[in-house]
Amino acid sequence: MSIYFKRLNIAVTRPYSRSLFTSAERKPNYPGHVPLSPLQRIFLVAGSAIMGLKAPWRGDMISILGDSSGQPFFLRRLLNQMLADETGRHILMEKPRISSKSLNLPFLRTLPLNTLGRIYVDWIDREHVSPDTRSPTRYVDDPEEAYVMQRYRECHDFYHALCHMPTNIEGELAIKWLEFVNMGLPVGALSALFGPLRLNYSQAAAFRKNYIPWAVRNGLVAKTLINVYWEKELTQDINEVRKKIGIEAAPALH
Amino acid sequence: MLVRRSFNCGRFAGQLALLRPGLCQSRLSLTRFHSSDSNKGNESYTHFGFKDVPEEEKEYMVKNVFSSVAKKYDQMNDMMSLGIHRIWKNQFVSALNPGNSTTPMKVLDVAGGTGDIAFRLLDHATQRNHDHSSKVIVADINPDMLAVGKRRAKKTPYFESGRVDFIEQNAEVLDKIPDNSIDIFTIAFGIRNCTHIDKVLEQAHRVLKPGGVFSCLEFSKVYPPLLAEVYRQYSFKFLPLLGTVIAGDSESYQYLVESIERFPDADRFAKMIEQAGFTLAGERGYECLTFGVAAIHTGVKL
């Protein structure tokens, strides 16, 4: 019996295997940062993925899934893509945050009907959502990557407005497919693969027939979406913006 | 996502985030807590988990924690203790053996908001001792927890027959309970959240009849050192994340595990009970459960 106790003791106290467990002793790198150990990260990815599937109204589960699964490779790759592009570098330098104040929603409501800003604010008003409900990034270790993750989440609404994609389940999943093909983060892959399991047979068939080809085609051809400086495009005509990015409006579902 | 609601993952975070050390918000927390310069000398501090907070703030912050966790309280208890809390509570109630008397008993369950102990006490009295008239008064400082308890009570026969009462009381004051009127005073997993444990024990001594029993079920220190370390890792590394996933609230569960760590060990607590005027039951006055994860302290008012 004692030999098993000794082995257990070693697993808890020896340095290199302890690295599986230690995390909370590390200092936070930015306000709101919660350092995680590898084991905690695995649990959070699995737990938030399962919870996100079971309770899709829990938006915080998807954002936590994104936070915890981005490391170490995927967010770094996205950050490099931003650094390689001029607009991306601008965004990283200025680090704009999207909120109802920073976007100046009342001003957007006065814009002409064909502009991206007007379409965006009309969509927000119609769907009764707000740009302020995105929770801050907590589980990403590097501050730059944390900003990239934050920006990734905040721009999600713009993809809806740009492609005129509704916010029903199929619409959300189509945008997730688009995001994954375009930017390659695991949260996109997980949502894209497992999300459709919630659709019934006819919904899934229509989704497969219409939305997936659109998402894949546009994801591959379009400019990397995170490199678009949305705040500067708000007064542009929406078709111009679509042509610049290389994206089409969403097809009809049925 | 389909429907966006800001869940309470942020609701209490604002409060507790002010207290997190090492962040730039710590400057804010200093100005917040030291703003009343006139009281600077007189302000006494107590612990709130691992943080130190002014005493008058602690009650309010604890209230917020429990409002935050009330809806998912029972589910989280099951998840955190892997269902073992039910065994502890059953043991607690059967050791007390309520209803074992010719006259009907009056039991006061403090900090018993969701009614777990109250319903077990009534079930035991009714089924084991065939006592159909003993009453349980559930007192809790938090109205949200009481609301959950009332909802659960309506599904039992006790609500109709008036054998269970829910009142909003502060355990340190208990102004609605007259002196020497209670046969059994129970407090399960509540006393570590109180600002002044000695005041709670004083009140318990006041309201109990002579011969009345005080019994407290609370977390305690795990005694085998290896198991203590495993338990510590489990509490601090795993439980707040479980709170995030299940209830969308990691700060409240962080507070809960820190408050467990801060609570005095079984011997010290037994001494505090003795100092309040009780006579300890048994040799040491307490019984450890599950290697010391929980302990039942019992005292009698003689």
Image (cartoon, rainbow, N blue to C red):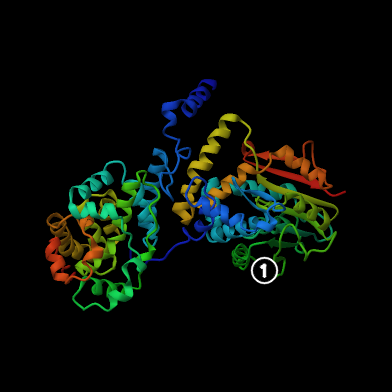
- Position of the N terminus of chain B, as image quadrant, is bottom left
Amino acid of disc 1 = Phe
Residue A196 point in image, percent of width and height = 26, 59
Relative to residue B75, is residue A155 drawn left or right?
left
One can see residue B111 in this view: no
Write down the residue under mark 1. B159
Q: Classify A1 as above or below B219.
A: above
Image height check: is A237 above or below B89? below
Quarter where residue A116 is shown: bottom left
Residue furthest to the top in view is A3
Q: Residue at x 70, y 59 (%)?
A: B122
Q: Could you tell me which secondary element the residue under label 1 belongs to?
A: loop
The structure residue drawn at horizontal position 62% and vertical position 40%, both measured from the top left corner, is B293
Is residue A213 toward the left or the right of residue B260 in the image? left
Q: Nearer the viewer, residue A24 or B226?
A: A24
* Residue B286 screen position, x and y as percent: 74, 40
Q: Is residue A69 left or right of residue B128?
A: left
In the image, residue B270 above or below residue B147 = above
